[in-house]
Amino acid sequence: MSDMSKDDMNIEEQPSFLGRIPSPTNCPRISSPTPSTSTDSTDSADSQYDEVCCACIICRRKFTVRKCALCNDALICSMNCQEVAVQDDIHSRHFAICVSKTDASMVFRTAKTLYKSVLGNKIPSDAATFNDYQFFWLSSLADQRKLLKIYATIISMKDVTPREWDIWVKENTLFERISMLFHCFPELISLEDLVWLKASNLWTEGLGKTARIICEDVIARKQERLL
């Protein structure tokens, strides 16, 4: 049998963050919203029933297989409709159910509460959510809104679901995951916001060594482009 190299035998090695900046090939995979699909209409009653079942509960126009990011049950075709539903209180009963305080998992409940707060452009008023997502490191409302903006950009541009936020909090890797997103997708954050982050109490108290190293690399790359 011919000799195999280490690379051949370890095709999917886990990336190591110790002592180096991960390369773009090690970027985290974020689930993307499932594209909307439509079916050709027929004359049968069954096909008409299927179309109604597949219609977005918000716009009522698009047929989709994308589920609500909060409950993974109701059909909501896009982030645009998800935002409209929260901001304009359309189907507010549905979203009240999504963030119900009777949810069995306290951390998952805070992830859903964060999601609704972000889409409503509000600082979370729930104490557990406020703490889980590290707003307490920031004393001023202006700084808290900066952090809210970071979360909002990640949700709107990468469609990161409450379940994913929940995993990051449970793993205690919230800012490591966020910094990796910045490294792989620098358009998610401006140089101005990165400079703000580095000067904030969140940087010194909330971010771990790995997250700071990755963010500093993103800052350096953005500054190089200005030269």
Image: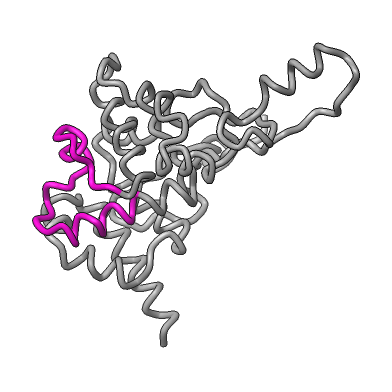
List the single residue furthest toward the left: 139
**Vertical arrangement, residue 66 with respect to residue 212, above or below:** above
Q: Position of residue 37 (x, y in %)?
A: 73, 33
Residue at 38% x, 44% y is 119
**Vertical arrangement, residue 132 with respect to residue 54, above or below:** below
Residues 214 and 31: in front is: 31
Residue 4, by quadrant, is: top right
Q: Is residue 77 magenta?
A: no
Residue at 29% x, 52% y is 148
Left or right, 63 with respect to 208, comes to right
Q: Is residue 125 magenta?
A: yes
Residue 130, by quadrant, is: top left
Q: Position of residue 226 (x, y in %)?
A: 41, 84
Q: Position of residue 95 (x, y in %)?
A: 40, 28
Quarter of the image with the C terminus in it: bottom left
How many numbered dots are placed on residues in this image?
A: 0
Residue at 29% x, 66% y is 194
Residue 11, by quadrant, is: top right
List the single residue furthest toward the bottom: 227
Left or right, 142 with respect to 12, comes to left
Span shown in magenta: 122-151
Residues 158 and 198: in front is: 158
Q: Which secondary structure dominates the residues rendered in magenta?
A: helix
Q: Position of residue 192 (x, y in %)?
A: 31, 72
Residues 83 and 13: in front is: 83
List the single residue furthest toward the top: 46
**Vertical arrangement, residue 183 with respect to residue 17, above or below:** below
Quarter of the image with the N terminus in it: top right
Specify the color scheme. Answer: one colour
